[in-house]
Image (cartoon, rainbow, N blue to C red):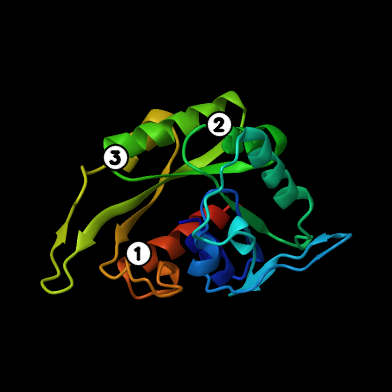
Amino acid sequence: MAVNVARALATRGYRAGIMHADIYGFTVPKLLAIQGRPEASENGIEPMESQGLQVMSMGFFVDDTMPLIWRGPLLIKAVDQFVNKVLWDTDLDYLIMDLPAGTGDVPLTVAQTLARASLLLVTLPELSSMKVASRAGNMARQTETEIIGVVENMSYMTCPECGESFHPFVRDGGQLLAEQLEVPLLARVPMEADLGSDREGAGLLVDRSDSAAGSALLELAVSLTSGS
């Protein structure tokens, strides 16, 4: 979702970057079909470039089959380096940070150190995901972080043969979460039948502008930038 939001912003002409702050996950390089490693100098680390985005991920430095057995201090140090040591363009309009779910060390560090950051909550419609997102939302309130709104991911699925839509999870979970937190529900993004494809770039739904998911993501970008 973070990659798709960043790409949607780029399609609207904004200069965007994505920082993969979910340190244990290595998916961003594959989603954006990026190979190689960033160049480093005494001045800092150059972000990678792909599809109009500046990108930084732990996946550039660690093999995707290797586990990271890190405790809190190392995670916090990695996030600090991604924020302060990466040579992000000074003219970036948006820096999207993909955070791990919940209220662990990384989300708390970001909330406490980046005063101007805002939170976009992503949830599945089902109860367990809603509860995790709700805790993140309540932490944002306690740290005085603005909550932009809620995105309901995997809202429904449409049969590619008969065209009938069905809901694999309980319905309206994103709306319920938005009402609990008193923020807007900004988008319902459906599942796509071939999203599980292993090919690089398969998860970039925003590039499928003729699909329901692509349209929902582009409309989300409009909502996010309506006040800019």
Mark 2 vs mark 3, CA separation in Å: 20 Å
- Find out whether the residues at labels 1 and 3 contact each other: C-beta distance under 8 Å: no
Q: Residue placed at 29% from the left, 60% from the top?
A: 191
Q: Position of residue 179 (x, y in %)?
A: 37, 33
Q: Residue placed at 58% from the left, 48% from the top?
A: 23
Q: Amino acid at mark 3?
A: Gly
Q: Residues within 10 Å of mark 1 (few under 14, many from 20)?
A: many
Residue 170, by quadrant, is: top left
Q: Amino acid at mark 1?
A: Ala
> Can you name the residue that lies furthest to the left here?
162
Q: Which residue is mark 3?
A: 173
Mark 1 vs mark 3, CA separation in Å: 18 Å
Q: Secondary structure at mark 2?
A: helix
Q: Is residue 186 left or right of residue 92?
A: left
Q: Which residue is mark 1?
A: 213
Residue 228 visible in the current orientation = no
Q: Is residue 73 left or right of residue 160?
A: right
Quadrant housing the C terminus: bottom right
